[in-house]
């Protein structure tokens, strides 16, 4: 069974840092894009950052310079380094992967269960 499992969330003070990880496991043939999205209470889910298999990255404009996305293709894992965290970064962070499970199958979108990040003093 295909799974995306996030880890690394928690409570951090303003100005602090956290590193999120997301490992994909199961029947995977090729992972194309991986990324992170977040959803704050009573708000829509929004893009944080994405990264391709060739390490091309895309960030939400408001997060450039504070957040860094990276991936380890050998481990099917994507990371999100978050620095200088602010209370407004508080949200559930979701891992996303676009992948196919067989050689010629159409890639599909998969989501992790989410990990809570709370920035508060």
Image: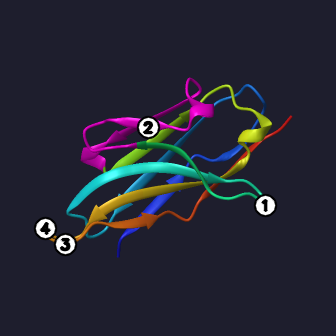
Q: Which residues make up the magenta segment?
A: 51-75
The answer to whether residue 110 is above or below residue 16 is below
For this orientation, the residue located farthest to the front is: 61
Location of residue 56 in the rendering, given as x and y in whole percent from the top left corner: 33, 35
Disc 1 or disc 4, which is closer to the eye? Answer: 1
Point 44% across, 37% down: residue? 58
Q: What is the quadrant of the C terminus in the image?
A: top right
The answer to whether residue 103 is above or below residue 84 is below
Q: Are marks 4 and 2 in contact (CB under 8 Å)?
A: no
Q: CA distance from mark 1 to mark 4?
A: 40 Å
Mark 1 or 4 closer to N-term? 1
Q: Which mark is residue 105?
A: 3
Question: Which residue is disc 1 drawn over?
Answer: 42
Q: Are marks 3 and 1 in contact (CB under 8 Å)?
A: no
Location of residue 97 in the rendering, given as x and y in whole percent from the top left corner: 39, 58
Q: Is residue 95 left or right of residue 10?
A: left
Q: Are marks 3 and 4 in contact (CB under 8 Å)?
A: yes
Q: Residues within 10 Å of mark 4 (few under 14, many from 20)?
A: few
Helix, strand or loop at disc 2?
Answer: strand
Q: Are marks 1 and 4 in contact (CB under 8 Å)?
A: no
For this orientation, the residue located farthest to the right is: 121
98 or 15, which lies in front? 98
* Residue 30 falls in image quadrant: bottom left
Q: Which mark is residue 23?
A: none
Q: Residues within 10 Å of mark 1 (few under 14, many from 20)?
A: few
Q: What is the quadrant of the N terminus in the image?
A: bottom left
Disc 4 or disc 2, which is closer to the eye? Answer: 2
Helix, strand or loop at disc 3?
Answer: loop
């Amino acid at each position: 069974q295909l799974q995306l499992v996030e880890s690394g969330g928690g409570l951090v003070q303003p100005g602090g840092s956290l590193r999120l990880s997301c490992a994909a496991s199961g029947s995977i043939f090729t992972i194309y894009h991986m990324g992170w999205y977040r959803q704050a209470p009573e708000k829509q889910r929004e893009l944080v950052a994405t990264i391709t298999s060739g390490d091309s990255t895309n960030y939400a404009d408001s997060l450039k310079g504070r957040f860094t996305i990276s991936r380890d293709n050998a481990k099917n894992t994507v990371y999100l380094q978050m620095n200088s965290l602010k209370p407004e970064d508080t949200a559930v962070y979701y891992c996303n992967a676009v992948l196919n499970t067989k050689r010629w199958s159409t890639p599909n979108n998969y989501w992790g269960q989410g990990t809570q990040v709370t920035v508060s003093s």
